[in-house]
Image (cartoon, grey):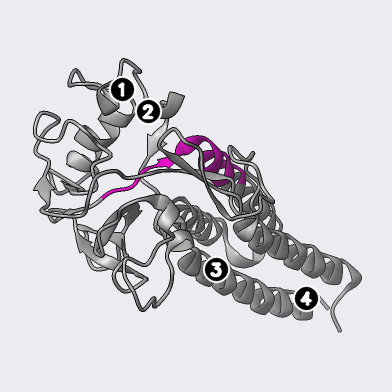
Amino acid sequence: MPTETGSKFHQFALMALIAALAAANANTALATCPGNTPTRFTDNGDGTICDSHTGRMWEKKTGTVGATVDCADAMVCPDPHNVNSRYTWAATGTAPDGTLYTVFLAQLNGLTGSPKVGGTSAPCFAGHCDWRIPASIELEEILVPSCSSPPCIDAAFGPTHASIYWSSSIGLGGPADAWGASFKSGVVAGNVNWASSFFARAAEALPVLEKQMSRSFIIGLALFVSGLLAMYLIGVVAGAALLLLALHYDQQSNKAHMLLVLTAYSRAMVRTLAVGTDSAQ
């Protein structure tokens, strides 16, 4: 039978892991948009859309779906809201430094010397200077899965190509892939090559960054405490490696992998704790 100390240790470790799993799914953000509105998506009238389910603010596209334009620079694509503009994820092949970031986001956040967003004098779009490329899990939230009439998105978002839209999440297909959301099929895919040209829709950064920071902190703290208590059973190096791996996947907002990592970690904890408590008799 396990000792009383071992039993309490076992219980504490499992509680910490359960807290970590809960944190991975918690929405701890301070909402930019109000919740519990009559409709989920609200047009703010300033080129942005509010999602009352997540508190997230989105960019609304303009124009008419038609011939696409590959945006080599801001002079080619002076209006970042144009539905027909396409961008690359990476230029060097090693980092997020393609026109998605150097042109599209730079225009939204007032970081270029090109004509201002929408032809106005405002330095940043809709009064926010922290627009970003959404993570794959966030794009998945606004997808209409397996819709029969593409594009698979609510009409409130304005014109949308029935095609792939970039996410900021690094993909699974190789070192030069990213996740993208297909608004034609209503699914996300993790093998979109960085050098390809696809569409973009920005999300306002403040709520999700706070959410990611909070999730990372809580998950990191729970795993760190668990690791400290179990280091004599699992080992510091193994515990630290699992922690870094978990936080890496959390940073990429890849919930599926995050949960797999935490599940594997909890199983290892249970097995080693059982061995440790039995040997302590």
**What's the amino acid at mark 4?**
Thr
CB contact under 8 Å: marks 1 and 2: yes
Residue range of the region highlighted in magenta in the rendering = 200-214
Q: In the figure, 159 relative to 163: above or below?
A: above
> Which class describes the residues within 10 Å of circle 3: few (<14), some (14-19), or many (20+)?
some
Q: Earlier in the sequence, mark 1 or mark 2?
A: 1
Tell me if residue 164 can be seen.
yes
| Dot 4: element | helix
Say which mark, if any, is on residue 277: 4
> Which class describes the residues within 10 Å of circle 1: few (<14), some (14-19), or many (20+)?
some
In the picture, the quarter occupied by the N terminus is: bottom right
Pair 2/3: label in front: 2
Q: Quadrant of residue 189?
A: bottom left
CB contact under 8 Å: marks 4 and 1: no
Tell me if residue 231 can be seen.
no
Residue position marked by numbered label 2 in the rendering: 125
Residue position marked by numbered label 1 in the rendering: 110
